[in-house]
Image: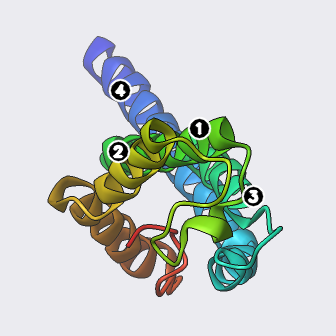
């Protein structure tokens, strides 16, 4: 009798844990689907002068990072950290992200600030960040059935 009760409790706890995991993943996937178009729009507008697409992308991805399942959370941390570093470097210059896209130093930006932006942008091209973005995109496709394409803002 005790074994049967213990087995029932174990089954109940296991199924509750699986439901919580599934519910968490479903919430993440739902948010990913909702944000997919915004990510595509922000990616397309990132280079336009006066656009806050970089800041919008960082905010959107931070929200997804917060909901990401454990198996992909380290990759989200890597990607969002790199994007935040770029956003911070650009903000410190007082210029727009789009002003840097041509690879030239915008007027009023110091050499040190320009180098900081270049370094942060280079981090996005690093193998570590690119692998994280690829893992997130593959997870989104495999688990959530969402094709992010190039909408993550890395690269």
The residue that label 2 is drawn on is: 78
Who is closer to the viewer here, 137 or 129?
A: 129
Q: Could you say which disc has been placed on residue 107 in the image?
A: none
- In this picture, is 85 found above or below 31? above
Task: Name the residue located 31 percent from the left edge and 27 percent from the top edge.
Answer: 7
Q: Position of residue 128 (x, y in %)?
A: 19, 54
Task: Name the residue located 33 percent from the left edge and 48 percent from the top edge.
Answer: 119
Q: Quadrant of the C terminus?
A: bottom left
Residue 69 in view (yes/no) = no
Q: Could you say which disc has been placed on residue 56 in the image?
A: 3
Task: Compute the Cα span from label 2 to label 3.
Answer: 18 Å
Does residue 12 appear left or right of residue 14 in this picture?
A: right
- In primary-sequence order, the first of circles 1 and 4 is 4
- In primary-sequence order, the first of circles 2 and 3 is 3
Who is closer to the viewer here, 23 or 101?
A: 101
Residue 140 in view (yes/no) = yes
Nearer the observer: mark 4 or 2; the answer is 2
Task: Compute the Cα span from label 1 to label 4.
Answer: 48 Å
Helix, strand or loop for disc 2: helix
- In this picture, is 59 found above or below 153? above
- In primary-sequence order, the first of circles 4 and 2 is 4
Q: Quadrant of the N terminus?
A: top left
Task: Name the residue located 39 percent from the left edge and 74 percent from the top edge.
Answer: 137
The residue that label 1 is drawn on is: 88
Who is closer to the viewer here, 42 or 52?
A: 52
The residue that label 4 is drawn on is: 10
Who is closer to the viewer here, 151 or 64?
A: 151
Q: Position of residue 56 (x, y in %)?
A: 75, 58
């Amino acid at each position: 009798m005790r074994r049967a009760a213990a087995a029932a409790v174990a089954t109940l706890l296991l199924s509750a844990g699986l439901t919580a995991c599934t519910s968490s993943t479903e919430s993440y996937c739902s948010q990913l689907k909702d944000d997919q178009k915004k990510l595509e729009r922000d990616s397309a507008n990132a280079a336009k002068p006066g656009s806050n697409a970089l800041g919008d992308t960082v905010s959107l991805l931070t929200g997804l990072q917060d909901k990401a399942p454990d198996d992909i959370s380290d990759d989200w941390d890597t990607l969002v950290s790199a994007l935040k570093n770029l956003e911070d470097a650009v903000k410190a210059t007082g210029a727009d992200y789009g002003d840097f896209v041509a690879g030239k130093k915008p007027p009023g930006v110091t050499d040190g600030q320009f180098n900081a932006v270049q370094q942060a942008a280079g981090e996005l091209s690093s193998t570590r960040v690119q692998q994280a973005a690829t893992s997130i995109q593959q997870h989104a496709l495999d688990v959530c059935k969402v094709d992010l394409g190039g909408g993550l803002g890395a690269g």
